[in-house]
Each structure stands twice: as C-alpha cells, then as structure tokens.
C-alpha cells in the first residue's frame, strides 16, 4: 500500500468513528509507525509500505478508533512547549492547565521552594523548574506510576536536582519533621464529581486513571483538603494556585473567602474562556 493511500483510508476510518481531527491523527500514527515526520510522509506519499508496516499502522488506527488516547500511543505530549513522556496509568496533561502554570509564574518569583500537589507526569513541576532556573520544586502524587514517570521526565529535562518527586497523599508525602514552608503551592487535583464520571468522553473515562479524575461526591474533596491544609505549609505572602472545574469556581472562591487568612482571590479563564484557575495569597 502507498503512504498516501494509507493516510487516506485511515483518515476515513477515524472520521467514521467520530475521532476529532482524523487527518492529523492518521498522520501522527503513520509517522509513529514509520518513525518519520509528517512532512516526510507527504514528500514520500507515493512510496510503498511493507506489509508489516501497513499491518502495524492499521493496528494503531484500530486502537485509536476505539478511543484509545493518541498521546498514549505516541508516548508523549507537549505541555507549555515542553515535551513530556506519558503512559497508560498516568493522567495526560491538558492544554488548559497551561493557564495555571502562567498564573503561578506571575507570582512565584525567582527563588525559593514551590510545592506541586498531584503532579501526574510532572508537567507543572517541570514547567516551573524550566522557567525559573533557581527555583526548587517538591512534587507529590499518590500514584506510584505517576511518581516514577514524573522522576523520569525531570531527568529528561535535566531538572531532577531541583524537582524532587515524592509518593504520598497530598501533604502527608512531606517530611512532617521539617515543617517546610513554601512560597507557593500549585495543584491540578482530581475534581470531577463522582456522578459525572460516566459522562466523560470515552477516551477519558475508559483509558485514563480514575484516581486522577474522581473528586468525590461534589468533586471538591481534594480541593477542600488542599485549601484547609495549605496555610500550614505556606509562608506568609505565599500563593495557592489551583485548577478547578468550570462549574466550581464560585464554591472554591467561597472556600477561600470563608477563611480570614486569604486575600487577593482571583479567578482566571482557560483558553476557551471557562473559569478554571483560582489563585489566592496567604496572609500568614
Ligand atoms: C488531574 S491529574 C493532574 C496531573 C498533572 N498535575 C496535570 O496537571 O496534568 C490529578 C493527579 O492527582 C493525583 N492524586 C489523586 N488523589 C491524590 C491525593 N490524595 N494525593 C496526591 N495525589 C493525588 C492523581 O494520581 C493524578 O496524577
């Protein structure tokens, strides 16, 4: 089969299965199969594929057509311009979380220590460390697979000495003896209300880890826990920057307002204009 024909038939198949951007998906899957760039595919559209290549490609297309995430097949994702490894069992970073990174960078300064709770593959922690070369980041996650991958990603970007990844439940992962205080805490925690998990897209609910999504009955279990305990780990004037579900921002803002120790509480929209990031300053 010719490369151009393979692309055409895979695009048609993915379209029939309602996969968004079927042509881009087909190009990336064929690029992965042949280990060539998308540009190369077009320059060589008349070249013949071997039977083995065609079979491997169609296997990937079939997997993708059933909703298996493209990023898990490719094994990587780009977050804020940084390429990170991803794998099944670990949450795939989303573009909207880049707003959280941006809003944290506005306030964290150049030095000191930042805590990233629920780090996943380490996207926020590594993003912060790369943008602020004198910053130290402690990143925690309850998932063994996430911790292992975040460590690996930190090594790939040569920031493993400034990004310490620890396994554990939120703040419990930290050394309780040290009583370390951070200049900021960032987090993109699980926040999907349990009753809405079944409404998520197939790619998400079938293939991404439930522990990364399930935020309890209302979706606020982890967020409330973070807001309650953050004051014990923030230095005065330190910031908490947290991603929320678009329908939760008022409730989350109320959580801050109900406590006297927070000021400068702001809500920021994601790239689609949905309220997503809540940021507040700890008065100390
Ligand atoms: C929505 S994902 C976010 C991952 C990454 N920070 C990002 O922005 O893409 C949530 C992460 O929180 C972790 N997690 C869930 N409950 C946790 C808890 N109690 N303590 C620490 N991590 C937790 C999950 O394993 C998952 O990696």
Image: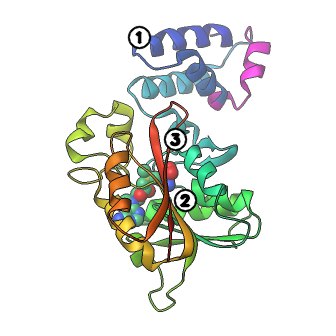
Residue 270 pos. (x, y %): 52, 38
Q: Quadrant of ligand 1?
A: bottom left
Q: Classify residue 32 by image quadrant.
A: top right
Residue on which disc 3 sits: 94
In front of the other: 277 or 87 = 277
Looking at the image, tell me whether mark 2 or mark 3 is earlier in sequence order. Answer: 3
Looking at the image, tell me whether mark 1 or mark 3 is earlier in sequence order. Answer: 1
Asked if the residues shown at circle 1 and circle 3 are in contact, with their CB atoms under 8 angstroms apart, the answer is no
Residue 186 pos. (x, y %): 52, 61
Q: Is mark 2 within 8 Å of ligand 1?
A: no
Residue 76 visible? The answer is: yes
Residue on which disc 2 sits: 149
Q: Residues within 10 Å of mark 2 (few under 14, many from 20)?
A: many
Residue at 73% of width from left, 28% of height from top?
A: 36
Determine whether 282 is above or below 192 in the image. below
Q: Is mark 3 within 8 Å of ligand 1?
A: yes
Residue on which disc 1 sits: 16
Q: 143 left or right of 83? A: left
């Amino acid at each position: 089969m010719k490369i151009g024909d393979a692309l055409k038939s895979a695009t048609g198949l993915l379209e029939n299965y309602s996969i968004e951007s079927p042509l881009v998906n087909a190009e990336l899957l064929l690029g992965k199969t042949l280990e060539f760039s998308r540009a190369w595919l077009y320059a060589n559209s008349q070249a013949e594929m071997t039977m083995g290549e065609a079979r491997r490609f169609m296997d990937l297309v079939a997997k993708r057509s059933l909703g298996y995430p493209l990023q898990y097949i490719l094994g990587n994702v780009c977050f804020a311009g940084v390429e990170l490894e991803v794998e099944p069992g670990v949450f795939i970073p989303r573009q909207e979380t880049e707003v959280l990174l941006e809003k944290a960078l506005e306030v964290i300064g150049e030095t000191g220590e930042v805590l990233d709770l629920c780090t996943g593959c380490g996207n926020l922690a590594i993003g912060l460390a790369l943008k602020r070369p004198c910053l130290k980041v402690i990143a925690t996650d309850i998932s063994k697979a996430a911790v292992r991958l975040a460590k690996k990603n930190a090594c790939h970007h040569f920031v493993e000495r400034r990004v310490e990844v620890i396994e554990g439940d939120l703040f419990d992962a930290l050394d309780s003896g040290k009583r370390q205080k951070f200049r900021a805490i960032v987090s993109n925690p699980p926040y999907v209300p349990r009753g809405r998990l079944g409404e998520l897209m197939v790619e998400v609910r079938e293939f991404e880890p439930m522990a990364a999504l399930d935020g309890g009955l209302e979706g606020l279990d982890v967020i409330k826990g973070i807001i309650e305990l953050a004051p014990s780990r923030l230095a005065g004037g330190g910031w908490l920057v947290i991603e929320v579900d678009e329908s939760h921002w008022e409730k989350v803002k109320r959580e801050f307002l109900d406590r006297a120790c927070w000021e400068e509480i702001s809500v920021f929209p994601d790239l689609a204009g949905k309220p997503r990031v809540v940021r507040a300053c700890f008065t100390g």
